[in-house]
């Protein structure tokens, strides 16, 4: 597992906060009241939809406050949290399977726990059929999560790269010798803050029409009728200090990638 140098990172983030996040300029997302909100499927091990450590009773009663990331995303999308991407068999032999991706044209898979073989197949077919995917795979998370290793609620500290990425001609590498400060790259004309980011490589140019972006920390690929944007970092989804005022930077990036 890549090393995490959180003390230096904490100092850098506190510096950004003290400066009013001047190091990461806020971006403007689409007007909140413009049109109907589109559906966005969300699969993640990060506490983006449910707060970290909240119990089932708290969540069911509505007493658990939504994470800031969920509030930001729900300004533009109707979120549909997903535990599986593959069709789920019916409860009886003659019951039809349920397809979690049916009716979705946008999907965000952010630091997943790991995709099953069936998930990989379903995701590839969905993208080739015209889906737009934001895939964030971080080799070294930098957020602090007060849960012990092995706790199922703890995010995946280091992303497992799904085989479908190689099917699209991509790989993710990690340089442990890199500095742990906050850097910034442009992604689709939007600011992308990075911390201990991975490096995306095109290993098979014939697999898909891919272009490296954000100084090599991301790639955008046309796959069949669909589109994949792979980002080898999830810091934007972990740290409110990097997300801009009102999470405007996060919202603008997701809108630029998924529309």
Image: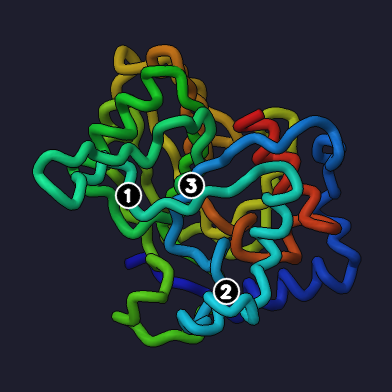
Q: Secondary structure at mark 3?
A: strand
Upstream in the sequence, badge 3 or badge 1?
1
**Residue carrying label 3:** 136
Viewer-side label of 3, 1: 1
Q: Position of residue 198 (x, y in %)?
A: 46, 49
How many circles with numbers are drawn on the protein? 3
Q: Position of residue 233 (x, y in %)?
A: 52, 51
Q: Which mark is residue 253?
A: none
Looking at the picture, does residue 116 appear above or below residue 36? below
Q: Position of residue 176 (x, y in %)?
A: 42, 60
Residue drawn at x 85%, y 58% is 245
**Residue carrying label 1:** 84
Residue drawn at x 41%, y 57% is 139
Separation (CA) of disc 2 from disc 1: 20 Å
Upstream in the sequence, badge 2 or badge 1?
2
Q: Quadrant of residue 235?
A: bottom right
Residue drawn at x 53%, y 76% is 60
Upstream in the sequence, badge 3 or badge 2?
2
Q: Secondary structure at mark 2?
A: loop
Looking at the picture, does residue 147 appear above or below residue 3? below
**Residue carrying label 2:** 51
Residue drawn at x 46%, y 41% is 135
Mark 1 nearby-residue class (10 Å; few <14, some 14–19, many ≥20): some
Separation (CA) of disc 3 from disc 2: 20 Å
Kindly tell me whether residue 221 is visible in this rendering: no
Looking at the picture, does residue 83 appear above or below residue 239? above
Viewer-side label of 3, 2: 2
Q: Nearer the viewer, residue 230 or 63?
A: 63
Separation (CA) of disc 3 from disc 1: 17 Å
Q: Nearer the viewer, residue 251 or 233?
A: 251
């Amino acid at each position: 597992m890549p090393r995490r140098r959180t003390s230096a990172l904490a100092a850098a983030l506190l510096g950004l906060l003290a400066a009013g996040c001047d190091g990461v300029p806020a971006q403007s997302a689409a007007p909140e009241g413009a049109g109907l909100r589109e559906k966005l499927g969300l699969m993640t091990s990060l506490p983006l939809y449910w707060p970290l450590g909240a119990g089932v009773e708290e969540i069911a009663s509505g007493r658990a406050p939504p994470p800031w990331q969920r509030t930001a995303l729900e300004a533009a999308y109707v979120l549909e949290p997903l535990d599986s991407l593959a069709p789920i068999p019916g409860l009886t032999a003659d019951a039809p399977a349920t397809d979690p991706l049916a009716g979705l044209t946008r999907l965000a898979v952010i630091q997943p726990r790991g995709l099953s073989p069936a998930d990989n197949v379903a995701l590839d077919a969905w993208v080739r059929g015209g889906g737009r995917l934001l895939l964030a795979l971080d080799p070294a998370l930098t957020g602090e999560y007060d849960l012990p290793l092995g706790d199922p609620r703890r995010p995946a500290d280091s992303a497992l790269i799904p085989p479908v990425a190689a099917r699209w001609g991509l790989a993710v590498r990690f340089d442990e010798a890199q500095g742990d400060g906050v850097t910034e790259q442009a992604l689709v004309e939007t600011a992308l803050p990075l911390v201990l980011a991975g490096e995306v490589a095109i290993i098979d140019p014939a697999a898909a029409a891919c272009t490296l972006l954000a100084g090599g920390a991301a790639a955008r690929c046309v796959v069949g009728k669909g589109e994949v944007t792979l980002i080898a970092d999830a810091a934007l989804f972990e740290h409110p200090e990097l997300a801009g005022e009102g999470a405007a930077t996060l919202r603008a990036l997701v809108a630029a990638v998924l529309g």
